[in-house]
Amino acid sequence: MATHSSDLPASLRRQAPVAAAALLALLPLSQALAQASSELPTVTVTGRNPAARAAVTGFGERPLAETPLQASVVTQERLKERGAQRLADLVSLDAGVSDAYNAAGYWDNLTVRGYALDYRYNYRRDGLPISGETSIPLENKSAVEVLKGTSGIQAGTSAPGGLVNYVVKRPEGRVRSLELGWRSRNTRGASLDIGERFGEGEAFGLRVNAAYEHLDSPLRSDEGHRRLLALAADWRLSPDTRLEAEFETSRRSQPSQPGFSLLGPDVPNARNIDPRTNLNNQPWSLPVVMEGNTASLRLQQRLDADWSLVAHAGTQRLHTDDRLAYPFGCTDASAYYGDRYCPNGDFDLYEYRSDKERRQTDALDVGVRGRFATGGMKHELGAGVLLSRHETRLQARVEDFAGTGNISGTVTVPSSPGGLAQNTNRTEESTELYLRDAVQLAPGWDAWLGLRHTRIERESVRTNGSRRTEYTQSFTTPWLALSHRLSSGQLVYASWGQGIESEVAPNRARYTNRGEALPALKSRQTEFGLKSAGQPLAWQFAWFDMRRPVAQGVGSDCGSDTPGNTCTLQADGDARHRGVEAGGTLRSSLWELGGSVMVLDAQRRGSAVPAVNGQRPPNVPEFTAKLQAGHRVAVVPGLRLLAGLTHEGDRMVEPGAGSARIPSWTRIDLGLSHEQRVNGTLLTWRAGVDNVADKRAWRESPYQYEHIYLYPLAPRTWRLSLQADF
């Protein structure tokens, strides 16, 4: 059905021309650069590769440019260019990705197309499910992949928006690399990457990564450390058989960072807030300690010229001591502010300490893939089963009022009495049967099918044995697409897919349906896209429409268990996100320009709470733009200048009509790298400054735990590193 401009939401009608103009402006420039590249000496430029593949799509054998999906692949080289230390550092590279409660010293999360990912279900490591409730190091990762769109094709249950997949470095041959780095205030560290193949016919491969970093960011009272040791090995038993094994152990210890908030009804002026202030600065504050041990074993067996079998098993064991002095609301003589701070900057300060948390995830994926033809059509088929099990084992936690603090960060209060609160242990098992098929219908025409049937068994219980819930649920998530390759090397496609989330009403007195599972919450996405992998310009454009049911308590009192039976957990309307994304990369012998923009219309609809209907959700910008540029200086061989611009639009700070909002902001980053060879050793010097203008702004406004938080943009930060490849 055709879509007329009058049918589009006002925000898209206003901002869609901006996205189109940003893309069209590259076309005449591409012609000029193409002509210039024929007149200048050829220089190899690293960066986005039109032939890049992404396993997170499920069609990893095909280049991204040939698949009817939107995904980004951030390679190790780009991670180093950006000085990336954590997942949250990737938000400046893709307009479809932004922050989701990313506090220093804590685990990271992303918002993709306006939906916050789920720590428990939206993260993968070499394709196997893991928990994101930890700090994941990047030194032993060759790339980070982000799938954008409903993730039912790859995940039994997950939040819509997409998936994140960490790709582990594997033995590739001889590697000898040492890197030293420093960033302000006084963070400093070293990493080592060694790889080799050996034995008859180089049958054996080994890769070792190690890193240590002393953490001392511009945030005050934030010192800590982290370390990593990772080993990957493989054995080519025969030309048709490969066995791969890898192990990673890491530890990070660092105080976490609470957010600021509204001051009564007002958004504080970010220019009056020192972003170096850490509200977790009490004498009794303890660091968050995150330890992780992860291992996997993969067997790849080629059955014949067209078929292969892969068996992949993995385990992740996390150990966490979660501690924080955190502000939550404010009580003064005149009023109680439950979701923000007092007008004078005071807040209620609580002590939180949940030690000896244990999380374990085990997974086994066995599948076959191959090619065959039938009825004049060619198939690329993949099918298999994924078994996974997750356990969370916690103890009673300390969570108690300690005193009254202030956003100045100078008030000291005594430790709390140490009152205990119960945690929740959970166990879940999942069996997923999946089928993926890419069918060549005719020259240039492909049909794509994804089908995943999932059975889950979940149970939870408080650490004192109370409030037990358990349920079993099964569902199927389909995904369909049709694509056509144009003669100009472009791909046009349309796709439709589903994703699933599963909720159970807590076994608490307030709920009328306590302990009961809700019907499976099915999110849906329709997407139309156009891609081009040409040279010197590669680009992509997508329009998407996503609908996600929202599970929410509805009733006269959903905040108290007294008198009881006053609230029902139910599907309460949906969150509809419609938008356009456009991005591309333009290369010549000396220049590389890249970037993306997204215009997003996000609204709540059909809620029993009229005030939220038609409103944009908190912490979701309407317009984002991320641009990067690289220039090789011809007169100085090996020198490359880098620049980045990040713009994010305003964000609402709470659900409902009349919500306050934080203003839009723009940040500029600069960097350079210089390569030189000294006695057979390749030295790569990198320097950069993030937030060049020392911009003061609110970076994000997560609405978490029914409380408004504001996180400031990091101050101007310098970084230096030296990498030696020998």
Image: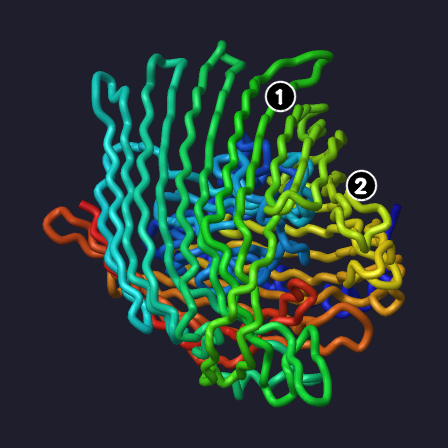
Q: State the quadrant of the C terminus.
A: top left
Q: Can the viewer see residue 163?
A: yes
Q: Quadrant of residue 378?
A: top right
Q: Residue furthest top?
A: 304
Classed neighbour count for the residue bearing mark 2: other residues with Cα under 10 Å, few (<14), some (14–19), many (≥20) = some
The kind of residue tagged 2 is: Glu
Q: Nearer the viewer, residue 350 or 448?
A: 350
Q: Against 462, is 685 above or below? A: below
Seen at 74% across and 50% down, the residue is 544
- 674 on left or right of 321: left
- 107 on left or right of 115: left
The kind of residue tagged 1 is: Ala
Q: Position of residue 159 (x, y in %)?
A: 67, 47
Q: Nearer the viewer, residue 151 or 442?
A: 151
Q: For the residues marked 2 and 1, what is the alpha-carbon distance in whole angstroms?
A: 33 Å
Q: Can the viewer see residue 524?
A: no
- 723 on left or right of 234: left
Dot 1 lies on which element?
Answer: strand
For marks 2 and 1, the one nearer the N-term is 1
Seen at 33% across and 33% down, the residue is 232
Dot 2 lies on which element?
Answer: loop
Q: Position of residue 22 (x, y in %)?
A: 62, 64
Q: Quadrant of residue 442?
A: top right
Q: Against 333, is 403 above or below? A: above
Classed neighbour count for the residue bearing mark 1: other residues with Cα under 10 Å, few (<14), some (14–19), many (≥20) = some
Seen at 71% across and 80% down, the residue is 336
Please name the residue that numbered disc 1 is placed on. Answer: 383
Please name the residue that numbered disc 2 is placed on. Answer: 516
